[in-house]
Image (cartoon, grey):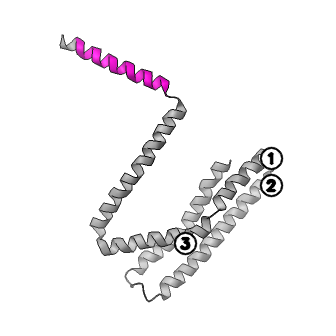
Amino acid sequence: MPIDRERQQTSYIDMILRKLAGACTPLARSAIGSVAIQSAAPALNLALSIVLVRVAGPHDYGIYIYCLAMVGLVLQPVTGGLSISVIRHLAIYRVRCEWAHLGGILRRGLQSSIAASVMLLLIGLLFVFFSVQIAPDSRSVFFVALVLIPLIAFNAFCSAVPCGL
């Protein structure tokens, strides 16, 4: 008798799962996955922060957070409106079949992003190198953070391109 009840419960659960799977469209499944990822990201960020504080210590973690804030602040002028502009213009040029303009916005957008990020990188390197306020043992962290500026700017530009196409 317990075996039949177990089978009955299993088949009932399978029936519910089949109904839910049939009711979920690919869009709904994608939305559920997106919500799950967006919900998990802050929890993983918190866990990573706790691990970093434990491993690095409060002083070194403070330097790390200061560098991240500095990179985020410096990236605002570099990536400000470029990605939105690239998305908008790529979509317009693609619909109008203006391939020369499409290539031009890609080329000039990439060039301006790299030029601005390298300029800010050089200014930041000079500031860190000649700054008296930054301890000599902390300068390597600032140098690594500054090197990330062109890479993050390039990533932001490249992430905007598929959205516009």
Q: Vertically, is 154 above or below 26? A: below
Residue depicted at 59% across the width and 54% down the height:
159
Tell whether label 2 touches label 3 (CB within 8 Å).
Answer: no
- Tell me which amino acid carries mark 1: Cys
5 falls in the magenta region: yes
Q: Residues within 10 Å of mark 2 (few under 14, many from 20)?
A: few
Q: Which residue is mark 1?
A: 97
- Tell me which amino acid carries mark 3: Val
Which disc is residue 100 wearing? 2
Q: Which residue is mark 3?
A: 74
Q: Main secondary structure of the magenta part?
A: helix
Q: Vertically, is 84 above or below 19? A: below
Task: Where is residue 55? Give x, y as percent.
Answer: 28, 66
Instruction: Give the residues in magenta.
Output: 4-24
Residue depicted at 41% across the width and 47% down the height:
39
Closer-to-camera residue (161/21): 21
Mark 1 to mark 3 CA distance (whole Å): 36 Å
Which label sits in the foreground, 1 or 3?
3
Residue depicted at 39% across the width and 71% down the height:
64
Mark 1 vs mark 3: which is more N-terminal?
A: 3
Closer-to-camera residue (56/80): 80
The image quadrant that residue 45 belongs to is bottom left
Task: Where is residue 18? Give x, y as percent.
Answer: 42, 21
Tell whether label 3 touches label 1 (CB within 8 Å).
Answer: no
Left or right: 16 as drawn, with respect to 31? left
Which label sits in the foreground, 3 or 2?
3
SS of the residue under disc 1: loop
Mark 3 vs mark 2: which is more N-terminal?
A: 3
Residue depicted at 45% across the width and 69% down the height:
68
